[in-house]
Amino acid sequence: MSKAADTSSPALAGAFSNPSEADWLAAAEKALGGRDPHKALTRPSDDGVAVRPLYTRADGPAHVDPVPGFASFTRGAAAARPGWAIRQTSDHPDPAAANAQILADLEGGATDVALTLDLALDGRGGRGGIAVASLDDLDRALAGVHLDLAPVALDPGAHGVTAAAMLAALWQRRGLADAKVAGAFNIDPMGTLAAEGSLPVPLTQALAEAAHLGARTDARFARVTALGVDSGVYHAAGAGEAQELAAAIATGVAYLRAMEAQGLPPERAGRQIAFTLAADTDVYLTVAKLRAARRLWHRVMDACGAGDVPMALGARTAERMLTRRDPWVNLLRATLAGFAAATGGADWLSVSPHDAALGGPDDQSTDTARRIARNVQVILAEESRMAQVIDPAGGAWAFEALTDELAQAAWVQFQTIEAEGGIARALETERLQARIAETARRRDDALATRKHAITGVSEFADPGEELPAVEPVDGDALRAAARERAERSGHTLPQVMTANPGFEVQITALTQGATPTMLIDSGEGVQVARLARRPLAAAYEALRDRADAHVAADGRRPAVFLAALGPLADHGARVNWARNALAAGGLDAPAGAGTETGADAAATLAQQFKDSGCVEAVLCGSDAAYEAEAEAAARALKAAGCRHLTLAGKPGDRAEAWAAAGVDAYLYLGCDILAALGAIHDRLGEPA
């Protein structure tokens, strides 16, 4: 007789031990040489939120939304997740070339079309965009695109109403019913003011026009949003996560107020705003930021009596994290950021190509780079099946705690903005810019000391790398051609425009042949201090540019000799460390073969230095070798013609004696590497 089947279920983790928090603390303390793990491994965010190495049930917030799709929408706007929209941006100044990009994106897996438009045909202050001189140009850019299937999201800059009217006129030209089209006009006067420093009309007028567009969009289009809140401008300028959230929520509140003044109640006005946050390589904080954003916006909407209206929230990979040097690492950065945005529940996501930081504002990523950027999302959604999971971070103590703490920090900063008179007043008085600049300064300090490392730039740099080519584009010529097309159109401003230049009237005017340049305002109605973009790698890459200028002018890279003191076992670690540090500034670092301990060591170093052809040196050896031989080595190197001698290590008790012997500076872990590299470049001079 056979035995009865054993139907008992084994414990899920039955084969594993069940360590306690005390066990973890003991193991971590041992690994850290006796240091307190919580103090050693806890790091503050840019806004002071503590990111701890271990979270337990005690760290979780008192309340967690039980399921997605219900207030406070922290866990997501819907109970069932259909995935996210894969949105790729096209900004080629030539409408025909932009069309080729768009069709390739859609065929390669993109679901949405994102257009950066240049309606003034002026390059948007270096930001570029599709030079659209007429409705025909927009039609050409979107040729072959089924606009009843593919949503279109605009980046209109300062001329949002005209851009929205152009897209609406194109839908009308294609015979598409209002109920069949989908997209986002994304008019964002506050974001434009922050990014560009000016608007062509007074801010009150810009807000009124945006609100009117919101009311008309609400009345006509069921699947289109009118206003956009893009916090990427604040993030690109250096804002921390809480600052970015506070600016986004404050901007959303300003738009709610403007639409309410136009007679649109909050429950309808809230559905006209689409938010876009920056996603970067800090997975924990990016996930928490997206979750906190939905909670914060629910708090606002609930106060307005519209708590059942969730936030429409997307993400774009952060501009400031992209590097020009070793751009292949941007593939990893984009993947981390995309993963974080998907985990955080983004409704749509744009991933920048890895070569996006290369070239000028009009130059374009290669087809291969655009394809890889699309595939990052496709792989995350389909192969990793992230599109099938709702709020995968939900319930995890680390993410729940960080979401709660980040939301609290952001709410305090939001209240500060409101107390200053709102986002407009905070920008006009430059208080917001000052706070962001202070956050950026603290981050810059951490980058300069390499406390925050940038792989391929401040760490593991390759001074002689060959950068990939991008597609060069003569944007000035293409914009000039667009202006000629507009002038040749022969159309004059329709009479209807003299009465009311609003959204509906502009649609009619464009349909009758008016050009965008006839409709847009070109003055300067308001000006503020613009938020300049601050790429994390900018300072290091500027040094690399200086080094490359030497190569171009003199045929060789500026170099600093590494004076290796003692045998390899003594000097190897510091030689490698110093070479890595100097490479971050684009400097070559030829090293000596080392020395034998004894009276001839200093003379050997001096001869090796002379043979190198360098004028500066870094002395590299062990602490014991420094104690015994650093003074003699320094004197010999200076006598051999070394103009500036740096010692790889911290100044210790012998610093005074070493200085007397000729040591001019020190290079060590935690010092200001950026300042040291800049000083070397200054001493070596500019290329002839």
Image: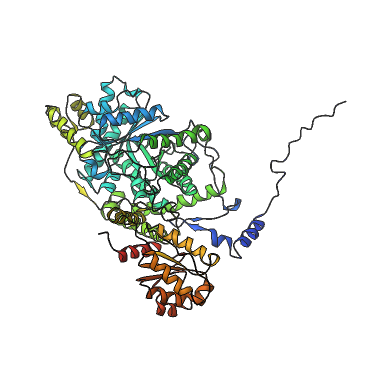
* Left or right position of 496 against 326: left
Q: Quadrant of the C terminus?
A: bottom left
* Left or right position of 498 against 14: left
**Image quarter of residue 26:** bottom right
According to the image, what is the colour scheme of the structure?
Answer: rainbow
**Image quarter of residue 202:** top left
* Left or right position of 53 against 165: right
**Which sits in the foreground, 330 or 405?**
330
Q: How many marks?
A: 0
Residue positioned most to the right: 1
**Image quarter of residue 611:** bottom left
Q: Quadrant of the N terminus?
A: top right
In the depicted structure, whether residue 263 falls above or below residue 176:
below
**Which sits in the foreground, 541 or 659?**
659
Q: What residue is shown at x 42% (from left), y 75% (from top)?
A: 634
- Where residue 87 sits: x, y (%)? 39, 34
Q: What residue is shown at x 46% (from left), y 74% (from top)?
A: 602
Residue positioned most to the top: 175
* Residue 609, visible in the rendered structure: yes
- Where residue 216 sits: x, y (%)? 28, 30
**Which sits in the foreground, 631 or 453?**
631
- Where residue 148 sits: x, y (%)? 35, 23
- Where residue 484 sits: x, y (%)? 15, 32
* Residue 493, visible in the rendered structure: no
